[in-house]
Image (tube, rainbow, N blue to C red):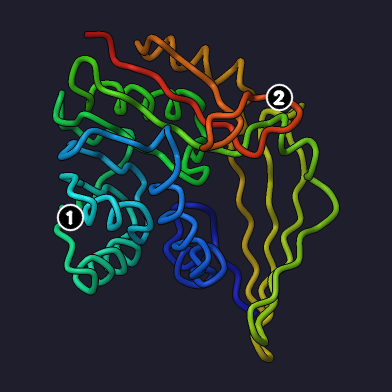
Amino acid sequence: MTRTGGFQDDDFWTGFHDFLFSEQRHEQAEELLGSSPLLDFPAGSRVLDLCCGPGVFSVPLARRGHAVTGVDLSPPMLERARRLADGAGAKVTFVRADARTYEAPGAFDVVLNMFTSFGYFEDPADNARVLRTMHDSLTPGGTLVLDLAGKELLARRVTPPKVVRRGEDLVVQTDTVLDDWARLRSDWVMVRGEHVTRATLVWFVYSAVELRRMAEEAGFERIEVFGGFDGRPYDENAERLVLRAVRPA
């Protein structure tokens, strides 16, 4: 049996990669970029994909002609992203950096943070710092798109445990609410042949109201919240919590 740590443990991203970043996840990214009004950026936009992982969005954005920089703290994820970009003939600048301290003042027209890549840090002030990084990285008038599973959505599906099978491999994910819904703990078990890997992840979860307030405190304006990448309202039919905001001109 193998036990891995949390979000900053490279063993987790490597061990559970095939479940976290399946072929379907890559196909979904391509589909969203081709259809979503929230991801329809002007040609040649300078895009920062913060917490880019293995380049699920970085690479197709670059193939569409945008100038993309992917930032992540995990060397294995960045290596996968570079291989993906090379295989696609896409030019992407990949940078290993902490999302709290990455500095490129006013360098981007768009900042993306996708697939619930926010709320990872144990200190709530550090998660607020990530929002300020996003704000400061944008040129005045630039746009942030932040996508996560909102607290309201998680409340609908925190139970029962989730079971995902890929071939002969099996993953079971069990979620537990912590601290009066401030955080969520996910316990993961992967069975691969006779080998069992366990991981425990804890992260902060946010409602639309909480996330909007944080964005305002980080300096954003024209803040909008959507229930999906098709621009639907954030209501009982929402599928995601997608926040779009602008750095003041």
- For image coordinates 57% across by 36% down, the residue present is 228
**Secondary structure type for disc 1:** strand
Q: Residues within 10 Å of mark 1 (few under 14, many from 20)?
A: many
**Secondary structure type for disc 2:** loop
Give residue 155's quadrant in the image.
top right
Q: Image quadrant for the N terminus?
A: bottom right
Name the side, left or right, on which 31 lies relative to 130.
Answer: right
- Note whether 168 is above or below 15 in the view shown: below
State which tag comes first along the sequence, 2 or 1. Answer: 1
Name the spot of residue 218 as percent of width and height, x first: 38, 14
Q: Nearer the viewer, residue 168 or 237?
A: 237
Give residue 167's quadrant in the image.
bottom right
Name the spot of residue 146 as percent of width and height, x first: 44, 32
- For image coordinates 45% across by 23% down, the residue present is 125
Q: The disc labelled 2 sits on which kind of residue?
A: Asp
Q: Which mark is residue 73?
A: none
Foreground tag (2 vs 1): 2
- For image coordinates 18% across by 62% down, the residue present is 90
Spatial CA distance of label 2 from label 1 is 36 Å
- For image coordinates 34% across by 50% down, the residue present is 52
- Note whether 97 is above or below 182 in the view shown: below
Q: The disc labelled 1 sits on which kind of residue?
A: Val
Give residue 47's quadrant in the image.
top left
Residue furthest to the right in view is 160
Q: Image quadrant for the C terminus?
A: top left
Name the spot of residue 174 as percent of width and height, x first: 76, 56
| Pointer 2 residue | 235
| Pointer 1 residue | 92
Name the spot of residue 87 as percent of width and height, x first: 23, 74
